Amino acid sequence: MEALKPLLQDGLTLPELALRFILSNPDVATVIPGMRKTRNVEANLAASDKGQLSGELLAALRRHRWDRKLTPESFAAKAKRKLASFLPRR
């Protein structure tokens, strides 16, 4: 996250950056952000109203992406651990 802070300009916050980044993806139809307080709802609505990030900022963010190769085995193992965390322990 520290590496992204230099990209925050004009009052842009990390949560706003994250939400607008997701909204900038044309493959995303719905975003359900977490909100605990009224000010979170207001901030999310304001971020959404600002629309997509600029092409320049999206290009800068791409330099920070993490390309990882998921395999069926790695996905299955992670899903199994997650499901096990919800089951009662014996």
Image: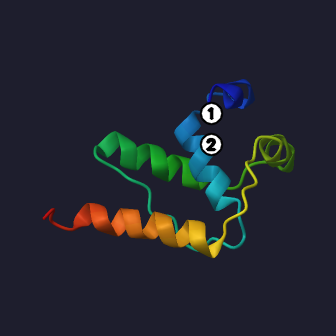
Residue 81 position, x and y percent, is: 38, 63
Would you identify the image quadrant in which residue 3 lies? top right
**Residue 17 marker:** 2
SS for tag 1?
Answer: loop
Q: Is residue 50 above or below residue 70?
A: above
Q: Nearer the viewer, residue 83 or 34?
A: 83
> What residue is rendered at 72% in x and 56% in y?
68
User: Does the CB distance between marks 2 and 1 fall below 8 Å?
Assistant: yes
- Residue 80 at least partly seen: yes
Residue 18 position, x and y percent, is: 59, 47
**Residue 12 marker:** 1
Please name the amino acid that badge 1 sits on: Leu
Please name the amino acid that badge 2 sits on: Leu
- Residue 9 at least partly seen: no
> What residue is rendered at 63% in x and 60% in y?
23
Would you identify the image quadrant in which residue 88 lies? bottom left
Characterize the local packing of mark 2: few (<14), some (14-19) or many (20 or more) Cα atoms within 10 angstroms. Answer: some
Q: Earlier in the sequence, mark 2 or mark 1?
A: 1
Residue 14 position, x and y percent, is: 57, 36
SS for tag 2?
Answer: helix
